């Protein structure tokens, strides 16, 4: 089976940085995109950043200029470098892989940004 394991979440002060990693294991046919979503209490789950296999990235307006997504296609791994973190970034961050026939999700990693 396919498993996605996130790491790198934690507690950080406003203005600090975190780097999230998501490593996928198992057989995944034709990954189209990898990305990160987040969900804060009371909020809808939203796309934070995504990157295609060809390296085209897109970001939520709220994180543009602060977050950078990257990937290693050979390792089926996606990263999210988060700089200049704000309390509003506090959420559970979920790794997502969009493949030809399935979407895959990690269990999430908590990111908490204190004032």
Image (cartoon, rainbow, N blue to C red):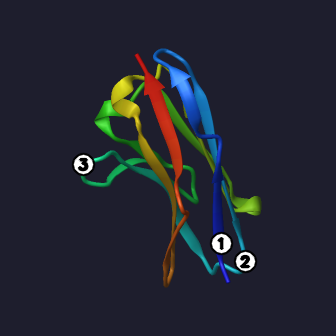
The CA span between labels 2 and 1 is 7 Å
Residue 24, given in percent of the width and then of the height, sits at 68, 65
Instruction: Please name the residue that numbered disc 2 is placed on.
Output: 26
> Which of label 2 and label 3 is nearer to you?
3
> Which of label 1 and label 3 is nearer to you?
3
Instruction: Please name the residue that numbered disc 3 is placed on.
Output: 43
Q: What crowding class fits label 2: few (fewer than 14 Cα within 10 Å), some (14-19), or many (20 or more)?
A: few
Instruction: Please name the residue that numbered disc 1 is placed on.
Output: 3
Front residue of 106 and 75 = 106
Number of the label disc, if any, that sits on residue 42: none
* Label 2 with label 3: CB-CB less than 8 Å: no
Residue 46, given in percent of the width and then of the height, sits at 32, 51
Front residue of 74 and 79 = 79
Which tag, 2 or 1, sits closer to the chain's start? 1
Q: Is residue 50 shown to the viewer in this render?
A: no
* Label 2 with label 1: CB-CB less than 8 Å: yes
Q: Quadrant of residue 27?
A: bottom right
Q: Residue at x 66, y 60 (%)?
A: 5
Quarter of the C terminus within the rendering:
top left
The CA span between labels 1 and 3 is 26 Å
Residue 57, given in percent of the width and then of the height, sits at 47, 46
Quarter of the N terminus within the rendering:
bottom right
């Amino acid at each position: 089976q396919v498993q996605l394991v996130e790491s790198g979440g934690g507690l950080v002060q406003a203005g600090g940085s975190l780097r999230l990693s998501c490593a996928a294991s198992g057989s995944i046919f034709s990954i189209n995109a990898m990305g990160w979503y987040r969900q804060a209490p009371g909020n809808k789950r939203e796309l934070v950043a995504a990157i295609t296999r060809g390296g085209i990235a897109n970001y939520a307006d709220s994180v543009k200029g602060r977050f950078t997504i990257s990937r290693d296609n050979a390792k089926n791994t996606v990263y999210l470098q988060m700089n200049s973190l704000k309390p509003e970034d506090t959420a559970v961050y979920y790794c997502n892989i969009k493949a030809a026939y399935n979407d895959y999700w990690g269990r999430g990693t908590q990111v908490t940004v204190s004032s």
